[in-house]
Amino acid sequence: MSPSVAVVIVAWNNYADTHECLESILAQKQVETSVFLVDNGSKTEPLVNLVMEYPGINYIHSETNLGFAAGTNLGLREALKTGAEYILIVNNDTRADESMVNELLMAAESEHVGLTAPLIYYYDAPDKIWSSGGRINELLLMPLDSHNRLNPVSVPTKRTFLSGCCYLLKKEMLTQVGLFDERFFLYFEDLDFCMRVKDSNWKMTVVPTAKLLHKVSMSSGGSFSESERYQYARSSGIYFRKYLNPVNTLPVLLFRLGSAIATSFRLLRQKKNRALKGYWKGLFEGWFSKLIDNSRQ
């Protein structure tokens, strides 16, 4: 008998995307799931209509958009009450292969593996890898291997970073490591979570036989939009401030300064002035806001 799996899907508008994601989860082979759909403040496309089409799902509604971390935590808290052995977190702008969850479960049978993730492909280019995870550089606090897009894996492979687009989490690990840090509205919440898993005794594994298609940056207005650059920059500041220490402070600050300059020139060349403005606003808020402290959550 397969272990019990609770599924958390967080959505903000994007009814069609959420519908497609939900259908792919409900169509999973060899696995029975209980689904928790978190409507994260949708206004233009009420997702409550999905409950009429799929009356078996659990619908959680937030009046406001809480961001990805806090919205996911809403679902996780309810999912944990079910007693499910595993909890799957999956972005609503994705479509899962029909055997994805079962493949993740089989890889999660190892005693020390607490998090498994699928091989993620571009939705519009389903043979092209978007992410197979990476390795966090201890000195710079970032994975520098570009999601290993050019180095596909053929067997389950250990990582220290996996994209938060989709996680299968052991309940035991989640209880120990804790939920997502809600200071991250969008972006870097997964890197922060992986840092915390890495610091525990649990392992993370990418599973190449588990396949997921991802519509990149749908929730933030598309790649390098004003809102996307703002949220990315703000979250980056929160993340790096959280993990700075006497050893890595200088390398991180130099690395982030170089990254900020390179990003700014790139946006200027592309004449994306609004995105540039949003980027620097996000950097300022992330690094200097008095509302953000350095405590680890």
Image (cartoon, rainbow, N blue to C red):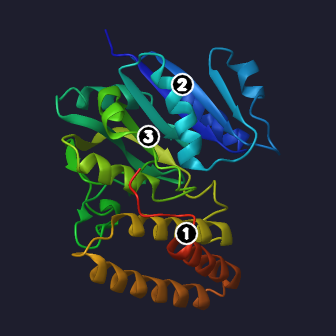
At which x and y percent is residue 216? 54, 57
N-terminal of the pair, mark 2 or mark 1, is 2
Residue sticking out furthest to the top: 1
Q: Is residue 153 left or right of residue 162?
A: left
Q: Nearer the viewer, residue 126 or 4?
A: 4
Q: Is residue 242 left or right of residue 206?
A: right
Q: How many marks?
A: 3
* Residue ID at (53%, 76%): 288
Residue on which disc 1 sits: 234
Q: Is residue 163 above or below residue 92?
A: below
N-terminal of the pair, mark 3 or mark 1, is 3
Amino acid type shown at disc 2: Glu
Residue on which disc 2 sits: 78
Residue on which disc 3 sits: 179
Q: Nearer the viewer, residue 280 or 228?
A: 280
Local SS, label 3: loop
Real-space CA distance between mark 3 and mark 2, rounded to the nearest whole angstrom:
12 Å
* Residue ID at (46%, 87%): 262
